[in-house]
Amino acid sequence: MGAVRRFWAPHAAGRRDLRLDAAETHHLLRVLRLRPGAEIEIFDGAGNAFSARFVAVDGESRCLVERGAALPPREPATRLTVGVGVPKGDGLTAIVRQLAEIGAGTIVPLISEHSEGRAAPDRLARWRAAALSGTRQSGRATVPTVAAPAPFEGWLRGKLAPDRWIASPRTARTVPQGTPGRRAAGDHVLAVGPEGGFSVVELEDAHRHGFRRLDLGERILRTGTAAVVAAALLLRPEE
């Protein structure tokens, strides 16, 4: 795919003339190499997107753009929160980017019994940058919230929407299977384990807190694959 001419401007809804920040300016000038007069798109991260025109570079080397007409909304009717076990290495960065692309609303890095990854503070900034990147790439106008890492046990006991699913292979019988079908508009929650999966105790705890098993078949999937497949199933619109 070609470069996406979309730029984040957090105050776009309230202003006609906008000044891009340093990172967005770099993307426009150095990555896409656009010139004044170029037609672009801007989004504010809160659900609004607009046509726009790159006007000039100011005295502080920032790009000035002129906002145009509002664009149609592109968000799914389903609002999905995904709690995903932190995998080893920097694997969660790509997972966050992919979940942002397909429409997740909130992403919570989970620390569970089998988690091998670190949840260092510097990684949270990287994950949030990946959410912005996925939003830009996909054409969305809402940047998903990436919460601070949370223990799985504590997350289960928090305030979650009542429609709750946990991604699991068919061989895991601890949590009864449900059938999501086509999703109606509303709030839904998905839990996806790390590479080692959730422990039996964690699965039993999830069952007690109202989670149903979202069947992902016989195969054992990587965390990123399972997260994207399961999220896509829950984000399908109602027929």
Image: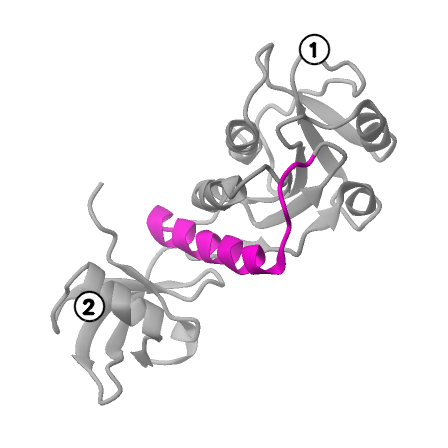
Q: Main secondary structure of the magenta part?
A: helix
Can residue 215 be seen by looking at this rendering? yes
Image quarter in which the N terminus is found: top left
Q: Is residue 80 above or below residue 193?
A: below
Image coordinates of residue 160 in percent, x first then y, are: 76, 46
Tell me where the magenta segment starts and ends, as one range: 115-139
Q: Tag 2 or tag 1, which sits nearer the N-term?
A: 2
Residue 39 sits above or below residue 92 on the image:
below
- Residue type, mark 2 in image: Leu
Q: Quadrant of residue 36?
A: bottom left
Q: Nearer the viewer, residue 239 or 199?
A: 199
Residue 170: x %, y % from top left: 67, 12
Secondary structure found at label 2: helix
| Visible residue check, residue 73 | no
Count neighbours of disc 1 (C-alpha within 10 A) and say few if under 14, some if 14 to 19, many if 20 or more.
few
Q: Residue at x 70, y 10 (%)?
A: 171
Q: Is residue 176 above or below residue 108?
A: above
Left or right: 233 in relation to 16: right
For image coordinates 19% across by 68% down, the residue present is 29
The question of residue 104 being in magenta is answered with no
Q: Which numbered marker is on residue 150? A: none
Residue at the far bottom: name it. Answer: 59
Identify the mark at residue 29; answer none if there is no mark: 2
Residue 206 falls left or right of residue 94: right
Q: Residue 171 has which mark?
A: 1
| Badge 2 density bin: few <14, some 14–19, many ≥20, Cα 10 Å | some
Badge 1 vs badge 2, beta-carbon distance below 8 Å = no
Q: Position of residue 189 (x, y in %)?
A: 68, 40
Amino acid carrying label 1: it is Thr
Residue 118 among those drawn in magenta: yes
- Residue occupying image coordinates x 81% and y 30%: 202
